[in-house]
Each structure stands twice: as structure tokens, then as C-alpha cells.
Amino acid sequence: MFTAILSTIITSFSDVFWKKSLNYNLGASIHSLCSYPMWILLVLYFASTGFDFLSIHILAIGIVAIILLIDIIREPIIQQVYKEEKISVIMPYLNLNRIFVIIASFFLYQDVSYISFGIIICTIILIALSSIDIKSRRLPRSFWKILFTESWNAIWILLWGWLILNYSEIIYFNLYIILGTLLIWYITLKKKQFKDLKWAPIDYWKYRFISSLGWISWFLSLVVIKNLWLSISILLGFLGIASTLFISYVFLKDTPSKKDIILTLTVAILIWIWYYFK
């Protein structure tokens, strides 16, 4: 439980400072590549703890390759979304992937009780209702981009869930990092985006470093999936709505609406009820 909450808080910091770093308009691939020092540190850490790459399965390598392909497809688009919209506006929509994953996971893995699934459905309904702007009767201008990336993100998480529940999270996390670094480095070279770095001020590197802590958060979430299974891990991730809105308010001066605050409190209460009756 503590690991899940820690992962969620780190993710919120990562999202907010990632948005701040996007203000400097670097190329999409070089922006992704700038988090690779954190990847290398993680690989070196796990190398010191010991892991056996000889135990990697061919099928699992194929799954990692599909995950990397999804990364390439969604990364430029989600960067555009964060540039165009406030976090408080898009936050409910950024949870669409969790909704898809939880429903699919319930039928694929059957890893939650009916009480837990009922609470999950209530949470989903609340988030869906909060996504409707009754006054303007319109969706955010980036809605279709968000729907596209969140659909791919749901597939991404389900594939990761299958890997983690069937194999070792450490081996495939490291394989993903190594192959991902090489792939993004190649794409950045091909697009000749390294020259963009000469325009990057010190503040950019500061924001990018904080946002790269998301990789630590992602590994922690894999540990949570391994121990609590997929659906419950995703449900706990909804707590990120509260932490992200708060951190966004502090660092981006992005004031949440009353609807956002009510949603946050209600979701927190539902998760507490789930934890009590699990």
C-alpha cells in the first residue's frame, strides 16, 4: 500500500514538471532522450543486485518490442496534449486508460472481488461524469488526441501486466530501458534533434530531471502490480488525481475547480471503502 502511494506521488511530481519542461519546445524524441541518464542509473542499480538476462523468453521480447512501438506512436501526441491544455482540464480524461485496463483486467485476470469491482465501477462513473463540461457543453480541444493516446496506453499497461504477472519485473524493466534508450537515440539522430539542446536553459534540465523520476515511479508500480495484481494497482493509481491537482496548483498556479475537488475527495473515500472491505 505504501509503495503504491509513493509511486503515485512521484508520478504526480513527474507529470507536473514534465509539463513545465515542455514549455521549451524541444523535439519530441530529444525530449524523451533527456531522461536516459535516470534510465542508466536504474540499470546500473539492478545490475549490482544481479539479474539473469539468459532467462528471457522470446515471446516476452516480442511483447517488449510492441510496448516500445506503442511508446513511439503515443509520445509526440501526448506531448502536444500537455502543451495545449491545463492539467486540471485534462486530468479526468488522463484516467481513461485506467478505466479500460480495470474492465479488461477483471475479465482477463479475474483478480478482484465483486465488491472491489463494484467500487471500481462507481469510481469510473464519477470520473466519467466529472469529465462533462455542463456549462460549455464541449470537450477539451485535445479530447480526440487524449482518447487515441489513452487507448494505446491501456494496451501498453495490459501488456506490462502480462509480463509482470508471468515473469520477472526486474529483467523486463531493464530490457525495456536498454532497448528503449538505443531506439530513441537512433530516432533522435535520424531527426537531427540534438541541435535543439543548445537552446535548452538550466531550468529545462532541472525540470527534466525531476520529471525523469517518473521512471522510478514506474518501476515501483511494477512491484505493486506483482504484489497486488493489476486491477487493484490501477485503482490505487486514481489517488494520483488528488496529488497531481495539488502539485499542479503549487507549481503551475493551475487552480482546480470545485468539481475537481469534490471528485478527488469522493474517489479517495471510495478507495478507503475498498481498502476496508477488501
Image (cartoon, rainbow, N blue to C red):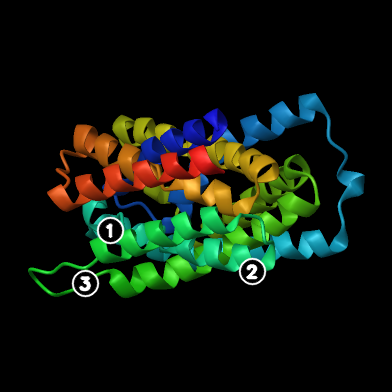
Local secondary structure at mark 3? loop
The local crowd at label 3, few if under 14, some if 14 to 19, many if 20 or more residues have their Cα within 10 Å, is some
- On residue 90, the disc is 1
- Disc 1 + disc 2, Cβ < 8 Å: no
* Relative vertical location of residue 208 with respect to residue 193 in this rendering, above or below: above
Residue 23 location (% of width, % of height): 26, 48
Give the alpha-carbon distance from disc 3 to disc 1, as whole Å.
10 Å
Badge 2 marks a residue whose secondary structure is helix
Above or below, 187 against 266 in this view is: below
As rendered, which of 218 and 191 lies closer to the eye?
218
Circle 1 sits in a helix, a strand or a loop, which is it?
Answer: helix
Q: Which residue is mark 3?
A: 139
When asked about the image quadrant of residue 223, the answer is top right
| Residue 255 higher or lower than 135, as above or below | above
Residue 107: mark in rendering: 2
Residue 136 location (% of width, % of height):
9, 71
* Residue at 21 percent of width and 32 percent of height: 250
> What residue occupies the far right of the structure in this picture?
54
Q: Are marks 3 and 2 in contact (CB under 8 Å)?
A: no
Asked whether residue 69 appears in the rendered view, the answer is no
Q: What x and y, as percent, mark residue 272?
A: 43, 39
